[in-house]
Amino acid sequence: MRRLLGLRRWGSSLVREFDGKFPRFLAVGFSNFVVSFTVFRVLLALPWSSQFKASLCQLASYGAGTVWSFIWNRRFTFRSTEPILGQALRFVSLQASLALVTASLIGLSVDILELPPTPSWLAIMGVATIVMLEKKFTVILEQIDTVIRQAHERIIGERRVKSKDKILSLYESDMHVIVRGKSDAEVEFGNTLFLAEQANGLIIDWHLYKDQAPADSRMIPDHLERTEKENGIHLNKLAGDRGFDSAAVAQLLAEKIQNNICPRNIQALSERLQDEEFRAHQRRRAQTEARIAIIMHCFVGNPARKWGYTNKARLCAWGILAHNLWVLARLAQQQTQDQAA
């Protein structure tokens, strides 16, 4: 039983993001304008007639600009490695409503009111672009003062900023400081994912914390409640590292569940190590680190390429489901091999 910590690492990513991505974003945006306007004017100049010619030309030009923008922002601006299908569907769904609105307005101004097409297109698309950018940047602009104050305190004033007052991400307010105390990652930033596996490797309980996660030992009561009441699993033995050990946990397990959690107290640990069954459980617990690595790198992704707690929780759910199906298939294969032997 372990925690999967820090779905995202922190560096000077904010500076790198604005230094590198923003100019590329502007370049793609300008090229998108050229493509959309060119397609609109070419289609409008072709010898064909329709009652809604300008509206249809706008739909086609907006569609061409959307495809152009998606391809180049994915490859050039953000260099995304996320599966293209899901990303494309989300991008198109966000742009579809704006395409219908602009096509209706251009149809009204050009097809019905017979206004000049080029000024009408430039005015409507200019307003639409401003509205779209305003929605994107409002989230950032509302936090600028806090970001400046935080940077001043930490860099110029060389004073610590309380975790509750820090902005860790401009787009994800539910990220938290996670202190691991390990040489390769003393501190990480993200959400804490609690995992519990049984002896054969199946994950029988998990929980992604939206708020700041409690201490390891305080996770145990909720874990037992989820396992027994929600999943209908009655535990006989429980093993974990020393972070999960506490007097409250020992009292909670008492006679109901055999407690094989590693003690914090050195003398108590020395005494428990005399028990062969306890040593066997601790050896098995050590394999959980490999289980965490498998889930992180093979099924969830590290960093998790999802924004927002809801999306990350959904990603974890699908990843753990796929992992368990993979484990079940391997167990069946192993049983067949054992029988054949």
Image: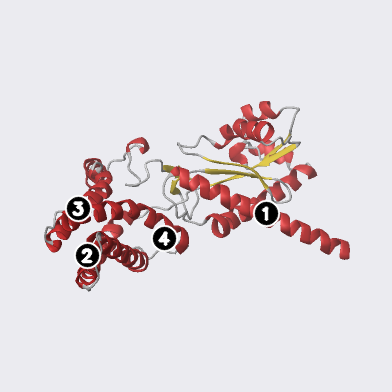
Between disc 2 and disc 3, the foreground one is 3
Residue 177: % across, % down? 42, 43
Residue type indicated by callout 3? Leu
Q: Quadrant for the C terminus, please.
A: bottom right
Give the CA distance from mark 2 to mark 3.
21 Å
Q: Earlier in the sequence, mark 3 or mark 4?
A: 4
339 lies above or below 264: below
Total label count? 4
Which residue has dot 1 on it? 325
Q: Which mark is residue 33?
A: 2
Between disc 3 and disc 4, the foreground one is 3
Residue 126: % across, % down? 17, 56
Give the CA distance from mark 1 to mark 2.
47 Å
Q: Are marks 4 and 1 in contact (CB under 8 Å)?
A: no
User: Can the viewer see residue 341?
Assistant: no
Occupied quadrant, residue 163: top left
Residue type indicated by callout 2? Phe
User: What residue lies at 20% left-to-right and 56% top-to-bottom?
Assistant: 106
Which residue has dot 3 on it? 108
User: What residue lies at 76% left-to-right and 47% top-to-bottom?
Assistant: 280
